[in-house]
Amino acid sequence: MSDIAVMDQVPDSQEVNAKAESPLFHIGAGINTHKDANSAGVLLQEDKLAGHLLIRGNRDDEAFNIAINNVLGTGLPKTLQCIYVDELSIRWVSPDEWLVICAGDKVYELEKRLRAAVQGHYAIVNVSGGQTLLVLSGDNVRDVLMKSTAYDVDDSNFPVGKVVTSTLAKSQAIICRRNEDVWELVIRRSFADYIWLWLEDASREFGLVVNSK
Amino acid sequence: MTQKNRLDVNKSANKSSGRINVNKPISFRYGGKPYAGYEGDTVASALLANGVDIIGRSFKYSRPRGIVAAGAEEPNAILQMGATEATQVPNVRATQQELFEGLECKATNGWPNEDFDLMSYVGKVGGNVMSPGFYYKTFMYPQSMWKTYEKVIRKAAGFGRSPQENDPDIYDHIHRHCDVLIVGAGPAGLAAAAAAAQTGARVIIADEQAEFGGSLLHSTELIDAEKVQVWVDKIVAQLNNAPNVVCLSRSTVNGYHDHNFLTIHERRTDHIADFIAEAPKKTIRQRMHRVRAKTVLLATGAHERPLVFGNNDVPGSMLASAVSTYIHRYAVVPGKSLVLMTTNDYAYQTAIDWFYTGRKVVAVVDARANPQGQRVHQARELGITVIAGSAVIDVSGNHRVSGVKVASIDKSGEKITGEIKPLVCDTIASSGGWSPAVHLSCHTGSKPVWDEKILGFVPGKTIQKQLTAGGINGCYRLKACLQEGYQRGCKAATDAGFQQMPQPSFNDVIDVDEEPAMALFHIPHTEPTSRAPKQFVDLQNDVTAAGIEMATREGFESIEHVKRYTALGFGTDQGKLGNINGMAITAKSLNKSIPETGTTIFRPNYTPITFGAIAGRHCGELFDPKRYTAMHQWHEKNGALFEDVGQWKRPWYFPKTGETMQQALDRECLATRKSVGILDASTLGKIDIQGKDAREFLGRVYTNAWAKLAVGKCRYGLMCGEDGMVFDDGVTSCLGENHFLMTTTTGGAARVLEWLELYHQTEWSDMEVYFNSVTDHWATATISGPNSRQLLAELTNDIDLDKDNFKFMDWCEGTVAGVPARVYRISFTGELSFEINVQANYGMFVWEKLIEHGEKFNITPYGTETMHILRAEKGFIIAGQDTDGSVHPYDLNMGWAVSANKTFSFIGKRGMAREDCVRPNRKQLVGLKTNDPKQVIPEGSQAVNDPNQPLPMDMQGHITSSYWSANLGHSIAMGYIKGGINRMGEKVYYPQADGSVIEAEICSTIFLDPKGERQNV
Amino acid sequence: MFYIYCPYCEEHREEEEFHVVGQAHIDRPLDPDSLSDAEWAKYLYMRKNTRGLYQEQWLHAIGCRKFFNMTRDTVTYEIKETYKVGEQPTVV
């Protein structure tokens, strides 16, 4: 028996037509709380059914870093940093924890490649079912974030490429600034409805439009 | 009614309408009657313009009261506002509420109304005996009547009322961060903001008033040879245009909390309408700004101190500066003839302002023997009579001042030295000097210190990164205020890390020279204080000088005790006017100095805040997060009722049409044991554990052994604290040699993960193991019952379900309905069970397949209640229901789950070996069977050995779980009994609140299938 | 509301991201079974109630999930320093 149980958790779409429901599958495109969808202050999109992989390990371990680098094509981001490479994004979560987000059907293969490359003390956990990625854009995203998190989202404190885990209303999120106008939230599945209701409410005065991917 | 006190703008000497817009008349209703005012008015200025003298009745004596002040410090003019039931707001200060078309308000105090008040007769009769502690002393006996007394007293006293309908308005919160937060936009605050803004720092400036300017809004002084209002307009425009500055007007900084965290209460539409309907609703009425500032600059100014003399509460008795404010800012002269009483030069300005309105100044009464300041001369030159070395000792008039009595006083201000002269007037304005508005500086625990130079308390030492400028420091002259504002504004920016040196925003200011003020807090009377006419110190709470002296006589020496005995400084105004006078009178009465006596501490909030602003959007659906599983929508569609487990919404039971709860539970229980039931178990906490030391770690945090658990096997474990008491339990499965999945109780998930991290990070950091929550990642459908294997067989072709190959407490991997799954053969019902775990995105799909294929087995969804009954039939505990942090595994008769052989002293081992944990006669968990099989003992019932024992009876323990078991046909219960494990077969009794007694027999907790055969098939 | 420097995230964060755990620097005895009841009770229950500087343990619960220590003045609530587990305070 192997040391770690690794499992492809996504059904083979050739063999079975299993319906998959992302945490916010019911928030369909076309929701629009604004009279003019083009001038809505907030655009929201769920990056549905993506692959989410947690990597735990010792950042001071040279071999660990090299092995990860060989697979991901980049080193692990430093404190409060987020890196985007090709189809991957990698978020620093804590000094020994990173979140890799990739396409949902690539996550098993990525985990295997990482496990093949990395030696020693580390952990990799597939958490794709437990969380989801929300992409927020529009002129008023910062206003909505200011209503929702106590963390300072001003340019001076939150430049592009930064990531923090902080409070979001009475829940929490991994908040990342992808570029000037695009912010991303990684939220837990069970809190997703609450956070959706909160964001919808907080966006009301600016207008909210939901886009599909 | 006409606005008889409104100045005719064209005729008045200064030809100014102040800040009101006479071209925009506004009509409003006060106490049901229509009145007119102008845009820019407050309710107070409009009522004064209309000649309304009485604005309410006093709290205790029900005396008529009028408007005293022009700002937040107003103690009397407290209104109940709102045009509809839903928009009612209590305790609105008329002096701060801006007028809008259609505004509806009435006096808070006074019943049936403020002009004719029943209680005033009680007050007149009772007045002499209604001393401090009156209510305590009078209504003490009989104690049972207190609640009745209280209702009557409250109605008569009047505190305003909350709406009986839901508030239709939207309130919200916003988080802000800045380099410099400036509180107050008067001269010092504006000068500071102008400076700090130039450095590029992120600046927030907040002011409670409708417009920035503070005292400058009614000032007649000049900056750079122009009216001060010109300077204000210039600075405000600059600040509004600066991208790094946030200007918040109508925004009260109400709380100053630790580490420069401040709350600002912004009123966004209170000045526009009672309610703004807009679809979709998006107008935010009030917003709470939660601000973290690098540096805070308090420029909160000062409040004028009234003087304390006989009948100083009769309507028409006002603060001197308030009179000037009404004249200059609102073009209102609140009377016909004025007597001004002062201890300082500054207040002469009020007499001068009044003089220029064309109305009569009867006299200025100055307590100082020989005042010669610049303003004094100016008044004299205008022909105003100045009566020096004297004081107003009493006021005549009932519903309005009709005159005052003046007498000469000695130098110390303690004795009357001459004859009493009456003066006829309808307004008495007084000024005892100024008290810095130190309130915010006190909120974090800093004690203000007495400054003899300015006769007031100024902010004391603080650890906050806080600066102060202007009136709050006792710096009252305009030039000094501006200079201090500029300097502190620069320093605030520098302290926050900005180096650039800004230019001052002013050049030339000429100050008026002033002579020192006299320290006078309590005007003497010919009679001793206790016999003199009432001399009010705190108008809102009806605290008099005599009351304070009496409190000290009765032994209350600490200022905090005096406050609580007399109510000095309580109420919605928090003693903004009365506190300093009250402390001075206390000090004098105790023969102490003011610094020795000290001051009470101001606490948040500075002025009352609506509950709406406190709650923000955290209300209704958003009050608390609701957590849902991936199958939640199915539960909803199929009629589940839900139970809150932590924040999770778990199906409680699934009633069919017409079923009672018990009928539904009976059906769910029977169906599960007879065929197959299905439970959504996704909420159980799940922790992924990886690393070569994972196994050893489990051995340390669980009470039982893990060294030999093979891959593919599951084991139940108990988790204890260091004290040996059980705090969580669950099944942990060995997924790989270095890989485990731990399950926890639904409510304990976060705590258990934190517990593991605590020990890993702080005690055993060399152990190679990582913990990660996968609670939300896996959706779990548990099928339970004799037909569960057959059902699963229909949905899988790659899991060997043979009972010898897939045994009880095994897990295996395969597909269910084509979806990759981990299936655990573990059971919380005692039946053959399979817990099917799939990635949560496929949870609903697999659930629906199970239901679809289960139809032929009459598959029955069940919720937490049936789960509780089924497990209780088997005697399985629920941590948190059958345990309460005071029981160890042996108390639960679960010694089998404790391994004494482990080399490491696992958490809980030493704790449960303590003397008290091994003593005999501890309460132990047992089963209880009622004599009458139909009777269900209420949970929480206390057991006794002898129901006829006289009170107090010897308690033996209590019931923790109790249900009707449809499977067994009788009730079942678990509970604690002292020494219960060795008392099998004995009788115990459960006396009930209704006098009945339930008799029960102590038995095993396992009511069904004691050998565990059903789960092993 | 404290403003707390997390030594792992290397910046200040709002108090609502943190949990306080209790007095810091209380090591679990290496051999609990050799201790008397009184000695064990001392480890288990006895805590300082200091007026002034106090070392306590905190968890960055909504953040990096790391435990760390803080030296705090219990009178003024001033935080003198925060430091990682395994390090010693420099302000005492």
Image (cartoon, helix red, strand yellow):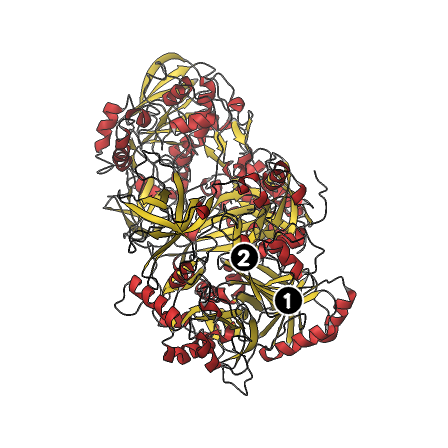
**Residue B89 image offset from top left, x and y in percent:** 33, 48
Left or right relative to C80: residue A133: left
For the residue marked with disc 2, what is the amino acid?
Answer: Ala
In which quadrant will I find the N terminus of chain B?
Answer: top left
**Residue B561 image offset from top left, x and y in percent:** 44, 26
Within 10 Å of the Cα at label 2, are there few (<14), some (14-19), or many (20+) other Cα atoms? some
| Residue projecting furthest to the bottom | A14
Mark 2 or mark 1, earlier in chain: 1
The answer to which of B786 and B795 lies nearer the viewer is B786
Question: Label 2, label 1: how many angstroms apart (C-alpha)?
Answer: 20 Å
Residue B750 marker: 2
Q: Is residue B6 visible?
A: no
**Residue A49 image offset from top left, x and y in percent:** 54, 76
Q: Are marks 2 and 1 in contact (CB under 8 Å)?
A: no
**Residue B806 image offset from top left, x and y in percent:** 54, 74
Q: Which residue is mark 1?
A: B739
Res. B176 image quadrant? bottom right
Give the secondary structure at mark 1: strand
Left or right relative to B89: residue B444: right
Residues indicated by labels 2 and 1 sit on the same polypeptide chain? yes
Give the secondary structure at mark 2: helix
Res. B397 image quadrant? top left
Q: Is residue B495 visible?
A: yes
For the residue marked with disc 1, what is the amino acid?
Answer: His
- Above/below status of A145 relative to A1: above
Residue B905 marker: none
| Residue projecting furthest to the right | A62
The answer to which of B958 and B741 lies nearer the viewer is B958
Left or right relative to B405: residue B349: right
